[in-house]
Image: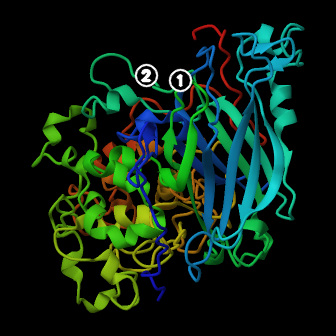
């Protein structure tokens, strides 16, 4: 059994100073679009989204994308959005449970040069104000030391308009795409990484207005609206050979099968600032001093935004994932008994949130298991001989997955966010189980990496689903589960097969994945149903578990199901940023 007690506990120090512009303490945070109180005041360091997927046009590589700065208006001049100076932006990779903390860390720091201080324009006569460059450093020893792999990377300027970008009085570029292409760097140092840092369309899509209006998603009155439509963000895109990320340096061709556990990685991103920033009385640049303090953190999407309660959001983002397991007393109940589940339970507040009427938690699954908040879920099975050899066996992970009474979602939501899901009973599709959730079923996921906590976990051995395939679905693993349960091409055998969308969220996260819908369906018990813990309107022994309640959950939608623009077929995959002079801006 993996020793889950091994955690990395970096010192988090807070320094107080007079004349402080920003007092950034050990509890400063960030995670997704303005989801926590303190980071909302520091947008340059706000890590809004994270993606990790096997590159669709080059399956020998994985692409990691971290977005920063929420809701950038393309016309937001004269001081346009940009990466911040005096910030460490980092993308972290864990690939080995035998080691403590990060196995690979990519660190980015940005520098701005004012090329023409005599104008208020951002671009004029071939000069940029402010021109941004970056240095990328890489650590492979837990952050003890770093090696520079890109010394002078270029960040494209904001996409202001045609006069600023293409005309002779501006930069005179062929077009904005040419600026993006010329900014793509190839790293030195043997890792063969390809890197792009710069502005892009914000690839995240969700009706933020409806969701935060007390769960009015889809909206009951008026049209839905993608809250990030026509907004930009700043991205760090890193395309990495799988052999560089794999713990033993093996290429994906060496994988034993498409769920090979040796090819699982965990990915998270962060931003850090100096503990103290002090204003100069003459208007000069502020000075920064003290220890580096993590002010932003992101692994799984929407964790801090829609799972962690507001009183602990700042604390959550001050921690690294390697501190999560030591903080179960503080944070575990947000996953064992998630607030959102209260609005999917008519015995609680379900009737008060009509938009989510299609999402209802199993209260009597198989006429015996109640997964509503405060109930026991599968805890009553503790001590049952049927658990021997399963993931619930006390000799393996039973103490984590069945921690006690009153923690019903410890078997599905908690491992999805904290450990990944193993290819082990009961975490296999109900196909072939004969009505017994604890029987062997059809494998469809293995991104189990029980080292640390909240991360995106990706099994790099799973083949990418072609984006132009008719089988491609933004529902990720939910779509793969439906195919594995209902499609005769997959549901007649328990043999491992490559089911389309097995490479989708929460097995990593593709740009196209509708993570808001998937996570709401997961809170609504769809993962439990997939492994054979069907909804209440199914009677044990009946022929067809595809009941009205299951159909309601699968058909549930927030109303915003795709990004407001396309994605590119090649690196960096994100679309060019919206132009400040575009129609509709």
Q: How many numbered badges does the structure rendering display?
A: 2
- Percent position of residue 270, x then y: 55, 52
Which residue is under mark 2? 225
Query: Dot 1 surroundings within 10 Å: few (below 14), some, or many (20 or more)?
Result: many
Report how far apart the C-alphas of labels 1 and 2 lie in the structure.
8 Å
Task: Give the quarter of the image for residue 569.
Answer: top right
Which mark, residue 229? 1
Indicate the quadrant where residue 316 lies. bottom left
Residue 212: name its quadrant.
top left
**Percent coordinates x, y for residue 153 in the rendering:** 81, 42
Find residue 52 and report its horizontal and vertical position in percent: 62, 53
Q: In this view of the protein, which residue sits in the foreground, 312 or 534? A: 312
Is residue 360 visible to us here? no
Secondary structure of the residue carrying tag 2 is loop
Please tell me how crowded label 2 is: few (under 14), some (14-19), or many (20+) other residues with Cα within 10 Å: some
Residue, x 57% and y 21% (percent of image)?
Answer: 230
Q: Is residue 539 left or right of residue 562?
A: left
Could you say which disc has been placed on residue 78 in the image? Answer: none
């Amino acid at each position: 059994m993996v020793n889950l007690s091994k955690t990395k506990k970096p010192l988090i120090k807070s320094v107080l100073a007079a004349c402080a512009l920003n007092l950034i303490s050990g509890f400063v945070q960030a995670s997704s679009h303005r989801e926590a109180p303190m980071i909302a005041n520091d947008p340059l360091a706000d890590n809004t989204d994270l993606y990790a997927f096997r590159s669709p046009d080059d399956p020998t590589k994985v692409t990691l994308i971290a977005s920063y700065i929420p809701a950038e208006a393309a016309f937001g001049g004269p001081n346009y959005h940009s990466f911040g100076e005096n910030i460490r932006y980092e993308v972290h990779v864990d690939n080995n449970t035998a080691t403590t903390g990060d196995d690979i860390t990519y660190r980015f720091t940005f520098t701005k040069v004012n090329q023409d201080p005599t104008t208020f324009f951002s671009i004029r006569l071939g000069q940029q104000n402010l021109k941004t460059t970056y240095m990328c450093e890489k650590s492979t020893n837990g952050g003890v030391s770093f090696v520079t792999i890109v010394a002078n990377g270029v960040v494209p300027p904001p996409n202001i308009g045609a006069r600023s970008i293409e005309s002779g009085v501006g930069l005179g570029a062929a077009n904005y795409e040419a600026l993006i292409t010329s900014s793509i760097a190839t790293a030195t140092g043997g890792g063969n990484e390809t890197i792009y840092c710069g502005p892009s369309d914000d690839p995240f899509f969700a009706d933020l207005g409806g969701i935060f209006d007390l769960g009015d998603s889809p909206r009951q009155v008026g049209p839905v609206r993608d809250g990030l439509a026509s907004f930009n963000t700043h991205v760090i895109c890193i395309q990495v050979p799988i052999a560089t990320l794999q713990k033993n340096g093996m290429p994906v061709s060496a994988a034993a099968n498409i769920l090979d556990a040796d090819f699982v990685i965990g990915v998270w991103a962060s931003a850090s600032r100096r503990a103290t920033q002090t204003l100069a009385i003459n208007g000069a640049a502020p000075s920064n001093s003290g220890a580096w303090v993590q002010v932003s953190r992101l692994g799984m999407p929407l964790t801090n935004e829609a799972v962690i309660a507001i009183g602990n959001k700042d604390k959550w983002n001050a921690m690294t994932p390697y501190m999560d397991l030591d903080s179960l007393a503080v944070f575990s109940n947000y996953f064992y008994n998630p607030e959102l589940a209260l609005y999917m339970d008519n015995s609680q507040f379900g009737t008060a949130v009509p938009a989510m009427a299609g999402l209802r938690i199993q209260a009597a699954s198989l006429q015996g298991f109640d997964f509503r908040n405060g109930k026991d879920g599968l805890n009553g099975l503790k001590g049952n001989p049927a658990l021997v050899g399963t993931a619930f066996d006390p000799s393996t992970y039973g103490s984590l997955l069945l921690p006690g009474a009153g923690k019903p979602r410890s078997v599905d939501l908690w491992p999805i966010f904290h450990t990944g899901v193993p290819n082990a009973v009961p975490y296999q599709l109900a196909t072939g189980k004969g009505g017994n959730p604890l029987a062997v079923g059809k494998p469809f996921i293995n991104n189990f990496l029980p080292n640390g906590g909240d991360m995106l976990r990706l099994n790099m051995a799973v083949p990418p689903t072609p984006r132009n395939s008719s089988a491609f679905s933004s529902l990720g693993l939910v779509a793969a589960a439906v195919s594995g349960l209902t499609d005769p091409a997959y549901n007649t055998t328990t043999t491992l097969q490559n089911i389309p969308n097995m490479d989708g969220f929460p097995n990593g996260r593709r740009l196209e994945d509708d993570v808001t819908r998937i996570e709401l369906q997961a809170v609504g018990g769809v993962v439990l149903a997939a492994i054979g813990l069907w909804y209440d309107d199914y009677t044990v022994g009946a022929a067809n578990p595809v009941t009205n309640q299951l159909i309601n959950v699968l058909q549930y939608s927030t109303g915003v199901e795709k990004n407001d623009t396309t994605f590119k077929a090649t690196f960096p995959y994100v679309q060019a940023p919206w132009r400040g002079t575009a129609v509709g801006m």
